Amino acid sequence: MKVVVTIRSGRELIKGGIELSDSATVADLQEAIHKRTKKYYPSRQRLTLPIPSGSKEKPTVLHYKKSLKEYTDGNGDTLTVVFKDLGPQVKYSTLFFWEYLGPLILYPVFYYYPVYRFFGYKGERVIHPVQTYALYYWCFHYFKRIMETFFVHRFSHATSPLSNVFRNCAYYWSFGAFVAYYVNHPLYTPVNDLQMKIGFGFGLLCQIANFYCHILLRNLRGADSGGGYQIPRGFLFNIVTCANYTTEIYQWLGFNIATQTVAGYVFMVVAASIMTNWALAKHRRLKKLFDGREGRPRYPRRWIILPPFL
Amino acid sequence: MAGFFSIFRRIYLTIYNWTVFIGWLQVFYLSVKTLKESGHEHVYAAVEKPLLWAQSAALLEILHGLIGLVRSPVSATLPQISSRLYVAWGILWSFPEIRTHFLVSSLVISWSITEIIRYSFFGLKEAFGSAPSWLLWLRYSTFLIMYPTGISSEVGLIYNALPYMKESLKYSISMPNKWNFSFDYYYLALGVLGIYVPGSPHLYGYMLGQRKKALAKAKRE
């Protein structure tokens, strides 16, 4: 079969189109485009069916596992697809590794090295026990995240735009330095012993719960499953849609109870608001998908992210 | 109900625009009068009340955008209004030492000319449904000169206030304290100056685009 590949303006990307076998899949087409253009590797391509001019509806995105025949609409000989360059892509594991590496390295720099001399503090620095425990807690958290990235998470999308690496690194690295600056400050005022123990104890409990939530989410998505949504069940997922975010937010609350810095609370609020947006979107999606009609299960009544508030 | 809301909206916006217009007219008149009679050192003292009042009234514009009373995007309104409020309250009102600087005059005159044209344009548009073409042209053309003079004055005044910020430690919080927080107003000002560098050309470009669109639309009509 012949596939005509155009860009959105209507101009042909590959002159004369591409000849493929009748059993070819979208993935085969993407490989063929890559072979012909060199620059556009498969994860950089977004292929859609053309939509009539003036139409407001969203175009159908071609799924890489499906056969091209499924998109030919009965006319089996030719197919026209619209190509969009998604720009340079990186693997999600690469993105997460670099964004989490920053805080993991930057925080100990503020703890171990005399960086505060550059900020005008000349005196001897007394390190409080809470600052040491905070270092362990912080490093454990980001080490855990990196390990989960490589050994636990299964991603619904293989890649992410390269620009996200810079954006996410800016977010994590700057907030990492911001929190580290205040928690390790020579003029830091520690909280009482009981508050510290409650904070770190609660936080650690939430980190373990967070890890278990990630294991449950991993098991929802089989190694060979092509994404797709399922109703998360078990443990905290029986009461909260995004229990992984719940435990993430509450473990930062634990850290902040123990360290008591405005910077830490600012980080927590910003992170919570970002995760709340994601959670609301996911909750809406799951409710829409599992509506109880045509044999589909009905999505159970649950908190979205922050029981007992939301 | 929709009809009542539409009438109420028009009446409210007409009153709002003409009230703020009067405020800026007062600022312009007093600044020019003082400049001629007593020199630039006395301009701020003469215009302080109407200037702070008229500039603070612009906060309502953000609210108008948020609740959908006007179409202008909050993303475009917010940086302009917040930077002006910062200069009016956070610099001029907070640091009396720089009120006698000659840049205060250029700032106040640039702001007031721009706002007199803008608020009268919107005032006429809300009251009568349209504004004269010459006013439309002024609305979208005076910024070509007023924007660079205004921005330069803002940057100059922030820069001149830096030593006084460092010296007085005004609005600054230092450690140790219970919440382990420190804040240095001096560094905030440096940050603001840093934002002005990429922000000004971006905003100028945005306004040039708006000008092109508005004047092309007026030509068609």
Image: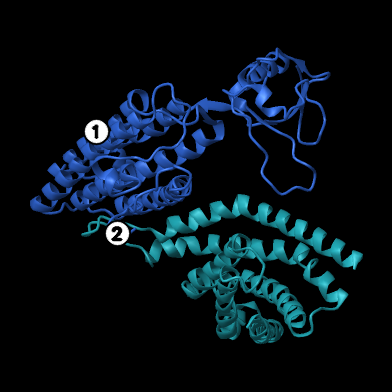
Image quarter of the N terminus of chain A: top right
Where residue A93 sits, quadrant-wise, is top left
User: In front here: A183 or B6?
Assistant: B6
Residue A234 lies, with reference to residue B206, above or below; the image says above
Where residue B46 sits, quadrant-wise, is bottom right
User: In front here: B20 or B98?
Assistant: B20
Chain letter, colour cyan: B
Residue to which mark 1 is pinned: A140
The image's mark for residue B174 is: 2
Q: Is residue A114 visible?
A: no
Chain A pictured colour: blue
Image quarter of the C terminus of chain A: bottom left
The percent coordinates of residue B192 (x first, y second) are: 52, 57
Mark 1: amino acid: Phe
Judge the density around disc 2: few (<14), some (14-19), many (≥20) Cα neighbours within 10 Å. few
Question: What residue is shown at x 72% (from left), y 18% (from top)?
Answer: A37
Residue B80 lies, with reference to residue B60, above or below; the image says above
Question: What residue is shown at x 17% (from left), y 39% (from top)?
Answer: A133
Disc 1, SS: helix
